[in-house]
Image (cartoon, grey):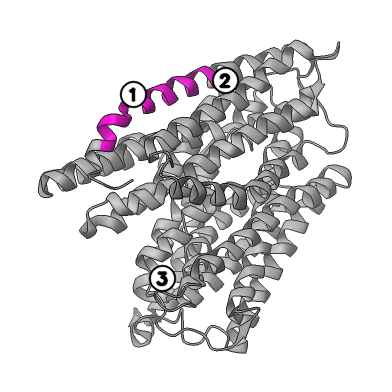
Amino acid sequence: MSYQDHTLTDQVSEQNAPIGADPAGPEMFGHPKGLFYLFFAELWERFSFYGMRALLVLYMVNNLFESFANRDEIAIGIYAAYGALVYATPVIGGMIADRLLGYRKAIMLGAVLMALGHFALAIEHPVFFYGSLALLIVGNGFFKPNISTMVGTLYKEGDTRRDAGFTIFYMGINIGAMVAPLICGWLGMTYGWHYGFGAAGVGMLLGLIMFWQGGRSGVFGNNGLPPEPAVIKERVAGITKEAWISILSFLSLPVFGLLLFNGTLDLPGFGETVFDGSIMHIVMNYILLPVIALVLIYNLVKVDSVERQRLFVVILLTFFITVFWSFFEQAGSSLTLFAERNVNLTFMNAAQTNSINPFFIILFALPFSAMWVFLSKRRVNPFTPVKFALGIAQLGLGFLIFAWSANYADAEGRVSIWFLILGYMFITTGELFVSPVGLSKVTELSPKKIVAFIMGIWFLSSSFAHYIAGLIAKLTAVSGTEGEAATGMASLLVYTSVFEQIAYVAFGFAVLALLLTPIMRKWMHGIH
């Protein structure tokens, strides 16, 4: 699990949510009781998300596309498209909740869609496979941005317990993310893929039940209800607007399925059409990126000189965080395949290695928070661009450790699991240098009139990062004969060569961030 789940949602809530409109009354352990319903709902949702994610590439390579010589490339492409879309839809889901549904209805709709998606994934058939991923993408768009916003509504503005409440909620995210690969990975790779995916579905169902029970018990007060209840009951073509949202959500599934699909389809009016990721390429590079660029240029022209310079810093920080996640997100694809094929997994399987990152997040998150406070009191806390440089450098060191492991491989091309663990540790410490502080500074630096838009771009930076991560991971794709996995020294050299290149490129971007620090610091105009 990445800290970005916390920063991309909880800090959005802190900036834009109608905070403390109706703080819930009942308390437990010194916090609103509703917090603990949200804690367990999110824990189980993250359990389902990361349990499925740990198995996804392995399932595609070893089962769904096993007979394809280019199965690695297909699996990595689908995984990258899935990740890109998962981080794009929350922008839309958050807007719909803000303006029409309210947070509760959006969360319930998202949870139902995701539960259906997980259980459909347990059916080992291509149609169910693409349909289930589409359900997860749409469901996550409704669920993820809004459950974190609900946490913010439980506290009055200025409540000193607020940060602690988000910390508790954040730990639930990481517990779910850490435990999921261990359980789902064990079930999936020991008893069958459908058991692992089914377990993820059960987790999502438990999250749905927990949230529904919280609403039923009244611990959320009046928070999260539709902003204008009468509006969603208005009818369009005889159907309420609320129902139309659900209908359109299901109608959008084929669109997302096609964005993910790899193969040939006979489309009415088009004939046989090849899908190989080119649609995602067009969407990301020729539609989304130009639109974002044009809107940014428009806003750069409108704001005053101080705001303009701060906005340039935001653009640079967003660029560097995109670079970071592009390398970091090798975790679910190339690093998982590397673990399966070239690591001596003495006490876990390849899917379970996805629990290493959230384990280190849980271990280091509070000490890092204390460290920043300690350094601030002594006025030696590094400026944000320096933290970004150090974070990217640590990520580079993690990948360099993966690359160095080739020097200590056995005759079968396998390396000690401790190289994997140590590399992940540095990737995680790098994450803690960039992700928790990144969005906080972005919201401070952005012109007040376009804060929401800039935060939307921050969401989409993760989407672009997943897309780029797929392009990088495809460099590690190893082909083999039909039904035969590529392993041994040949695959080890492919993986470690790419990991070494990632390390050096990361060091280069770290140096660039340091070189730009003086001008970025000047353009921040007093914001640390």
Residue with the mark numbered 3: 97
Residue 86 position in % (x across, y down): 51, 50
Residue with the mark numbered 2: 475
Residue 188 position in % (x across, y down): 81, 47
Q: Which residues are magenta?
A: 503-521
**Could you tell me if residue 173 is visible in this image?**
yes
Q: What whole-number distance in Å separates the C-alpha atoms at marks 1 and 2? A: 29 Å
Task: Determine the residue positioned at 44% across, 82% down.
Answer: 225
Q: Are marks 1 and 2 in contact (CB under 8 Å)?
A: no
Of tags 1 and 2, the one toward the viewer is 1
Task: Determine the residue positioned at 63% across, 69% down.
Answer: 39
Residue 209 position in % (x across, y down): 67, 75
Crowdedness near tag 2: few (<14), some (14–19) or many (≥20) residues, C-alpha within 10 Å: some
Name the dominant secondary structure of the magenta segment: helix
Element at label 2: helix
Towards the viewer: 454 or 333: 454
In this view, 234 is above or below 525:
below
Task: Determine the residue positioned at 76% across, 57% down.
Answer: 198
Of tags 3 and 1, the one toward the viewer is 1
Name the residue type under label 1: Leu
Query: Looking at the rendering, in which quadrant would you find the C terminus?
Result: top left
Residue with the mark numbered 1: 515
Element at label 1: helix
N-terminal of the pair, mark 2 or mark 3, is 3
Name the residue type under label 2: Leu
